[in-house]
Image (tube, rainbow, N blue to C red):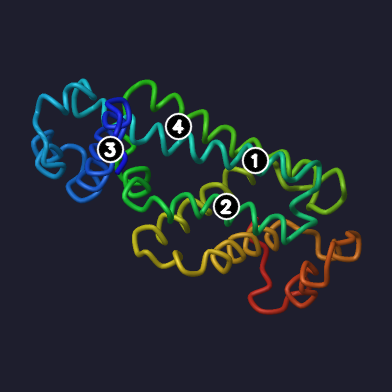
Amino acid sequence: MSVQKPHDKKIATKKRFLEAAAKIFSEKGFQSANVSDIVSAVKSGQGTFYYHFKDKQAIFDEILIDFINKLAVVIIENEARANGRLALADRALAIDNARRIASVFMENIDVAKLFFSESRYVGGEAMKRLDALNAALAAQIENGIRMGLAAGMVRPDVEPRTAALCFAGAAEKVISDAVRNKTASSNLDSLAAQIVDFQSYGILIRDSASKVSLNSTESQIPEGRLNGGGSGQNNL
């Protein structure tokens, strides 16, 4: 039987506080929750809590910063995995990128709820990281749109920055709804595909499918949708 080292025990205790706090904050909200709630859930003492955290704000910020860092890692990895490929021309790549981001939210439901509903309460450092995350994601999308413009795939009247912000905002609303209703945990691929398809068909030139060589038949843009099939209306 292995004996847990003091350092490992401290890490495990802190993790229990973080997990309990995330759940309590998501259920009660930041303002209504208090340190006593967290201590009670962990079955520990106030002294142990304050050994690890300065106050309620500190543990709340650490929870959000950790989550923001996870999202940032995925955004950076998505950029690296693309390796210069244009996501607008590779539906499978775009869907996988969206799925990877959505999975961070669905695998951390309690914290994701805080991210969407309680992030206005984060402190200075957490807010800086949140702003940086939003800027990085918008820049990544904007860069893809600019590449699409250069390749002749995107309508020339589309303003990249505005389109990127619209895309990011729409995706955030869809994922927020999925988190709130827990509707996507078993079908992330479908959720990601719907986000990508809705966004792509809103900016692609109608005959762009004929200009782009995609990697597989599954990545072909449905001609009917580009030529007015279904709802057939551009969103931008």
User: How far is the residue under mark 3 from the one under mark 4?
Assistant: 19 Å
User: How far is the residue under mark 4 from the one under mark 2?
Assistant: 18 Å
Which circle marks residue 100 in the picture? 2
Disc 3 on helix, strand or loop? helix
Disc 1 on helix, strand or loop? helix
Q: Quadrant of residue 215?
A: bottom right
Which circle marks residue 130 in the picture? 4
Quickly name the residue at label 3: 18
Quickly name the residue at label 1: 77
Q: Is residue 13 left or right of residue 72?
A: left
Disc 2 on helix, strand or loop? helix
Residue found at x 66% / y 44%: 78
Give 166 or 157, whichever is nearer the viewer: 166
| N-term-proximal mark, 4 vs 2 | 2
User: How far is the residue under mark 3 from the one under mark 2?
Assistant: 23 Å
Give 175 or 157, whichever is nearer the viewer: 175
